Image (cartoon, rainbow, N blue to C red):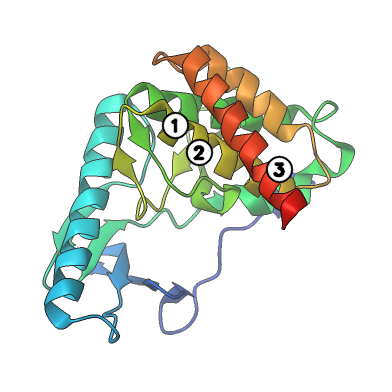
Amino acid sequence: MADADIQPEVVTSDGLLQQGAEGKLYVGQHNGVRCLVKERFSKKYRHPDLDIQLTRQRIKAEQKAYDRCKVAGVNTPKLLGVDVPGRKINIEYLDQAIVAKRFVDETASSGVLNNPKISWLSEEIGRTVGTLHGHNIIHGDLTTSNMLLDPISDVSGSDFPYRLVMIDFGLSFHSFNVEDMGVDLYVLERALLSAHSQVPELFELVLKSYKEHNTYKVAETIAKFEEVRARGRKRTMIG
């Protein structure tokens, strides 16, 4: 499939892009500029004071994650503004970007090893996650649904005119603990095997790139990931 055939996500007439249990994502305005607004719902089953406290903590954690990613050199949408009382975060709207999950689904019919675009993507995912962990950033929800391919105008020296952009840091946190990084990798492995069973070798290629780009306790992290994976398999067998 040609790149031009893969279209960006469609926005509904009211601007709503997505709604889930934790909140909604819609198109809005920030200082006269079109942006994405991530709004967290109030949880009625919580005590109001606790709900405000937890929401404040999670919004602040997400704000810090964007700041740390900027320092680390990890591509994210620009953070435009935070409205803690309004439970909102305003971020750059990459309206031409496509979700990595959709890209894999529409591109990987011939498998990873015979597809240079998917090979490129696996390299970029590994590099990006390795960079996150190298700067002690735990994403918390590593899936191809939380990765975008954003078109770039300067394509000199590249056959693939996109950059990988990480999104949705609502579960992210800062940690030096290799167990947290191992769990992050395990979540990614399960997500790739579940969402992209047509390319089962995808995670191993991602992991190869990860090992090359993570500069923080790589061997210990991989060992911990293997432990977490073994525990996960044991739970699956026992039920």
Residue ID at (55%, 69%): 10
Q: Depth check: 169 or 220 in front?
A: 220
Q: Residue furthest front?
A: 238
* Quadrant housing residue 131: top left
Q: Amino acid at mark 3?
A: Arg
Q: Are marks 1 and 2 in contact (CB under 8 Å)?
A: yes
Specify the quadrant that holds the C terminus: bottom right
Q: Depth check: 222 or 81 in front?
A: 222
The x, y position of residue 142, in whole percent, is 51, 45
Instruction: In the rendered structure, find residue 179 and report the number of the disc placed on it.
Output: 1
Residue ID at (24%, 62%): 89
* Quadrant housing residue 222: top right
Q: CA distance from mark 3 to mark 1?
A: 17 Å
Q: Amino acid at mark 1?
A: Glu
Image: 75 above or below 29: above
Q: How many marks?
A: 3
Identify the element where label 2 is drawn.
helix
Q: Which residue is mark 3?
A: 233
Rate crowding at label 3 as few (under 14), some (14 to 19) or many (20 or more) other CA atoms within 10 Å.
few
Q: CA distance from mark 1 to mark 2?
A: 6 Å
Identify the element where label 3 is drawn.
helix
Instruction: In the rendered structure, find residue 183 and report the number of the disc placed on it.
Output: 2
